[in-house]
Image: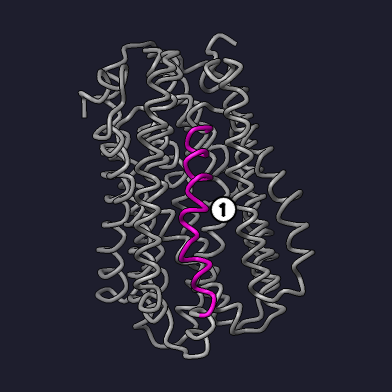
Amino acid sequence: MSSLFSAARHRPTHRQVWALATPMILSNISVPVVGLVDTAVIGHLDGAHHLGGVAVGATLITFILWAAGFLRMGTTGFVAQACGARDGDRLRLVLLQALWLALLLALLVWLVHRPLLNIALHFIDSSEALLAQARLYFNIRLISLPAALANFVLVGWFIGAQRGRAPLYLLLTVNLTNIVLDVLFVLVLDWGVAGAAWATVVGDYAGLLLGLWLLRPVLARYPGVTDWSAALRLRGAAPLIRVNRDILIRTLALELVFYLLVLQGARLGDSVVAANAVLLNFLLITSHGLDGLAHAVEALGGHALGQRNRQALKRVLVVSTFWSLVVGSGFVLAFNLLGGWIISLLTSVESIRSVATLYLPWMAWMPLVAVWSYLLDGLFIGATRARDMRNAMLAAVLLIYVPAAWLLRDSGNHGLWLGFYLFMLARGALLGGWFFWLWRRDRWMQPLGLNPSA
């Protein structure tokens, strides 16, 4: 992997793109595997309230973690640009300030978690036994929140530094530890739902310790001074905070689309809601592959920007676009050939299977529609242009998706998916159009990086 740095200064190659993409794809795949193991282990306990409690508690904690994903994305671009500029001081400052922000966010959630949990559970019409298990699971999982958020920062930092294997090792440690301890705590020691939660806590902290240890060789490549005072006082962190803020707004806007998708489907009946939930798994599968290539664009694109190397950035885009289209086409072929079989794996209810099969073509061709937004998200993250991503997302939601959803409200589920298609196309078109406008005016190669002296 060390040769990646020197080679990336000139013409990023197919090998370099895949050297970064492959570990991240493998890392992404490990995440749903943990969910399957959690379900299988807890599913062997007596009483549905155990599995239901874990499902509710995990959903609540996942919402917090998903909303905090800006810690990963907001870090990558600054690190990639610092590496491209060979700026060891800035590399360390970004790391420390991002970790400090992660800790402050965890402390904030700890302070307000009780009223938030009460409000969230108030609207869940379930048994007291289930809600008690959900509270137990959620409260234990909160113990690992600082580690989980710090791991987001470390993953983003390693991607920006073009150390693709480090996130793989970190996430595999988290997830494999979780799996092994799930079995030990729940099935062997009979700790029940608490055992599943503690397994995740230990896994998160094990990953954090490994991640901190993996920092050493990367920092050794970029000599610099660690300014602890500036980091703790967040001196010069305004660009980092702005980027994280804009990515959070973008994430919430995207979450709104999925919420409206479920809300619209609910008007069409239980079978349609369930079928759409099944079909959205196809988008989840697609994202595991295309996100890996987007991570490569983040790292190599940000690196080229830090060097002010236009030719390297053009090469990154050509190679990454080629492979994104190849992978997207592969998903299209697989979904068209195996879509029915995948649906059968996801549900055994015949009514849901038949409805999902009817609307399968929408998701079978989705990879070639979604590929552009994934690819361009990576490009903008690497350039730390989070404000542009935020504006494009808000425009796609407010100007395209919401009007389309309203106009197509009487077109059934086909209209619902057509509106989602238009939204995904708008995301790619808006980001792509803005990139070309900046590129033609020589404004893209002006980095918006962190200034340690600010």
Q: Which quarter of the image is occupied by the C terminus?
A: top right
Residue 7 position in % (x across, y down): 25, 20
Residue lying at the far top in this picture: please name it.
453
Front residue (pair 335, 306): 335
Residue 390, above or below 348: above
Q: Is residue 69 magenta?
A: no
User: Image point 64% across, 32% down: which residue?
Assistant: 388
| Quarter of the rendering containing residue 195 | bottom left
Q: Relative to residue 139, is residue 52 depicted above or below?
A: below
> Between residues 285 and 317, which one lies in front from this camera angle?
317
Label 1 environment density (alpha carbons within 10 Å; few <14, some 14–19, many ≥20): some
Q: Residue at x 63, y 43 (%)?
A: 250
Which amino acid, mark 1? Ile
Q: Secondary structure at mark 1?
A: helix
Task: Look at 45% across and 78% down and name the residue there.
Answer: 51
Q: Is residue 446 visible?
A: yes
Main SS category, magenta section: helix
Q: In the image shown, does 60 or 406 lie closer to the viewer?
A: 406
Residue ID at (35%, 47%): 205
Q: Quadrant of the N terminus?
A: top left
Which residue is disc 1 drawn over? 64
Residue 375 drawn in magenta: yes
Q: Quadrant of residue 256?
A: bottom right
Q: Where's residue 136, x and y in %? A: 50, 68
Asked if residue 233 can be seen in this view, the reply is no
Query: Bounds of the magenta span?
Result: 358-380
Where is residue 141 drawn, in percent x and y?
Answer: 46, 58
Determine whether 259 is above or below 390 in the image: below
